[in-house]
Image (cartoon, rainbow, N blue to C red):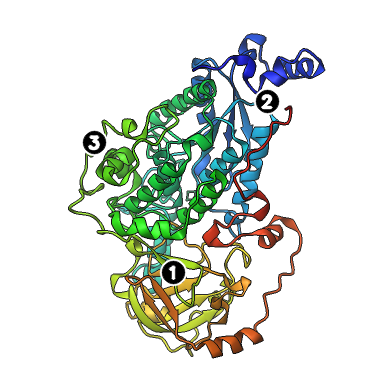
């Protein structure tokens, strides 16, 4: 049923008979609009995260024009609004601190302006979650526009995958396999177009998940950013935004329990980023959908990893798109999905993927030839992680999935950099590297979990060690890396009490992480422990540290948590 335009939010501003209406119309004329452009039309806010400090979104100025084309075609009135952009390569110590700041801005921008609907332009790591969280809280009809992956990297005749190959090259430098000039040469070919990282990092994972959750059209999230089809898709998204307003379909009506189930199934089949666990927990909280870490562990047990994409596999996002993208992947795991889930197009997820086909079985594997049978992502518990921890099994070394080794502990990234090659360390292939105080209440949950290997071991050809922390890891990283240990060290979790030489056992099949220290000894250490002191008391980062929830609850700030929806300011 189509709504009467008098019921649009924007009508409270533009159709008001008094001074508010006069001012609103006068000031929208100021941007060059005429009455025919906006009166009685759905007003669509195009929330753009364009920024020259976010090269993944450098095409968004142009794409916003394509969205406008679609909005005009459908009879809407488009207005472009910049919002905070979180450019992963440059923001330090981590964009994670700012995810909720961006979500708050999205929420406020949507609520305080005369907008009826929105197009949310995102892609680079934290931006999809921040956009969707803000739109959920604002409860305004919204569609997500995925930025699209960048083109495959190129270097000396080989294809480079974002992040993954950079780390491998730096490890090869340590082993003396390549020289320093090779790294300089790599720099120009690693990111050669607009678009987000083209490995199955956090951006590719979250954009694919947004598609599987029904927040953007089928097949949209893997279109490479410079591809002409990306422009056409942007116009389609503009038309969808207008339609959503006319049908009054709000984000919470799409992002229900079925959408989160489908998101987790998709995450597993992708061999996707561990960061998606944190973002989905935070999004579910905003949506009012109950979600537990164990939901990830449970679905991981049954869903195979089928996407053969780096860092878990071989291929890149251009290959994934050519092979059929998310619809082809979902088609292969239909039996795990809730196909009646709604999408922004008005069709169900099942209808959206009805014509899906896979065009390359090497990239999207058949069910009888998976990358991994199941358990691509493991949830761990134990006396070292009573609140849970996460391990990406699909990117780990199989031989290390059951490992007993002695701990070497670090209290900060600076400590790692200063001491990782300390010649006094007793090292072998079972050594467990431990990083503390990198959780939300520590330094804000940076992607420091893939600790560097000690040079002495790297020179002996060791390519992986078990590494533990309360940090995150980039979706482009790899290795036997246990992440998001909760409670975190800065909150007094057992991680804070680990000492050099303690025995630690990881058993991924059993889902356990055990610190082999007696309860009496841990109690003695706890009595002597003092929480870390942070000098900096001002700024958003300090506020985030004070307000942050645990990683297993989504690592959002407390005052934005919950599924209550914003009231209209003119009600
Ligand atoms: Fe933007 Fe990787 S740096 S997605």
Q: On the image, numbered disc 3 is attached to which residue?
A: 357
Beta carbon at label 1 within 8 Å of ligand 1: no
Q: CA distance from mark 3 to mark 1?
A: 36 Å
**Circle 1 sits in a helix, a strand or a loop, which is it?**
strand
Residue 186: give x, y in percent of width and height.
41, 56
Q: Quadrant of residue 462?
A: bottom left
> Disc 1 vs disc 2: Cβ atoms closer than 8 Å?
no
Q: Identify the disc placed on residue 114.
A: 2
**Circle 2 sits in a helix, a strand or a loop, which is it?**
loop
Q: Quick check: 206 above or below 170?
A: above
Q: Earlier in the sequence, mark 2 or mark 3?
A: 2
- Give the farthest residue toward the left: 368
Q: Identify the disc placed on residue 482.
A: 1
Residue 155: give x, y in percent of width and height.
35, 53
Along the viewing direction, whichever of 539 and 486 lies nearer the viewer: 486
Q: Residues within 10 Å of mark 3 (few under 14, many from 20)?
A: some
Q: Is residue 82 left or right of residue 372?
A: right
- Give the farthest residue toward the right: 19
Residue 538: give x, y in percent of width and height.
76, 59
Along the viewing direction, whichever of 418 and 120 lies nearer the viewer: 120
Q: Quick check: 298 above or below 6?
A: below
Q: Is residue 222 left or right of residue 356?
A: right
């Amino acid at each position: 049923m189509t709504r009467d335009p008098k019921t649009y939010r924007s009508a409270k501003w533009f159709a008001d008979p008094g001074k508010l209406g006069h001012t609103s119309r006068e000031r929208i004329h100021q941007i060059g609009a005429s009455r025919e452009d906006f009166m009685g039309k759905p007003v669509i806010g195009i929330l753009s995260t364009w920024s020259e400090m976010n090269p993944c979104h450098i095409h968004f100025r142009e794409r916003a024009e394509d969205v406008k084309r679609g909005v005009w075609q459908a009879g809407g009135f488009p207005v472009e609004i910049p919002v905070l952009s979180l450019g992963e390569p440059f923001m330090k110590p981590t964009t994670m601190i700012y995810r909720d700041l961006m979500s708050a801005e999205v929420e406020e921008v949507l609520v305080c302006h005369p907008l009826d609907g929105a197009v949310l332009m995102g892609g680079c790591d934290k931006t999809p979650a921040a956009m969707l969280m803000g739109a959920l809280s604002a409860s305004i009809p919204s569609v997500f526009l995925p930025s699209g992956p960048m083109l495959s990297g190129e270097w000396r005749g080989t294809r480079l995958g974002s992040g993954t190959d950079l780390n491998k090259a730096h490890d090869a430098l340590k082993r003396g396999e390549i020289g320093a000039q090779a790294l300089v040469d790599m720099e120009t070919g690693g990111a050669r177009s607009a678009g987000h990282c083209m490995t199955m990092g956090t951006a590719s994972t979250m954009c694919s998940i947004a598609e599987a959750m029904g927040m953007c059209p089928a097949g949209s999230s893997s279109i490479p950013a410079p591809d002409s089809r990306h422009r056409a898709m942007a116009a389609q998204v503009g038309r969808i935004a207008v339609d959503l307003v006319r049908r009054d379909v709000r984000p919470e009506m799409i992002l229900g329990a079925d959408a989160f189930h489908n998101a987790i199934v998709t995450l597993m089949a992708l061999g996707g980023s561990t960061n998606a666990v944190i973002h989905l927990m935070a999004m579910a909280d905003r949506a009012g959908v109950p979600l537990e870490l164990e939901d990830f562990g449970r679905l991981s047990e049954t869903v195979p990893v089928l996407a053969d994409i780096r860092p878990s596999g071989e291929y890149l996002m251009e290959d994934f798109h050519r092979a059929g993208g998310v619809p082809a992947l979902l088609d292969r795991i239909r039996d795990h999905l809730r196909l009646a889930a709604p999408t922004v197009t008005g069709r169900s997820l099942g209808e959206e993927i009805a014509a899906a086909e896979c065009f390359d079985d090497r990239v999207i594997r058949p069910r009888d030839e998976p990358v991994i049978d199941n358990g691509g992502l493991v949830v761990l518990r134990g006396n070292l992680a009573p609140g849970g921890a996460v391990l990406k099994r699909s990117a780990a070394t199989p031989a290390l999935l059951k490992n007993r080794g002695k701990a070497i502990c670090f209290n900060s990234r600076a400590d790692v950099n200063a001491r990782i090659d300390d010649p006094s360390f007793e090292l072998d292939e079972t050594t467990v590297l431990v990083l503390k105080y990198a959780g939300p209440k520590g330094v804000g949950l940076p992607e420091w979990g893939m600790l560097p290997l000690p040079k002495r071991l790297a020179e002996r050809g060791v390519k992986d060690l078990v590494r533990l922390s309360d940090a995150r890891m980039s979706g482009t990283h790899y290795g036997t890396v246990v992440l998001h240990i909760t409670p975190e060290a800065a909150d007094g979790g057992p991680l804070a009490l680990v000492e050099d030489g303690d025995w630690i056992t990881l058993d991924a099949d059993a889902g356990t992480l055990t610190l082999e220290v007696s309860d009496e000894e841990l109690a003695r250490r706890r009595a002597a422990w003092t929480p870390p002191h942070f000098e900096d008391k001002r700024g958003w980062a300090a506020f985030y540290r004070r307000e942050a929830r645990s990683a297993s609850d989504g690592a959002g700030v407390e005052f934005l948590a919950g599924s209550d929806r914003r009231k209209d300011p003119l009600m």
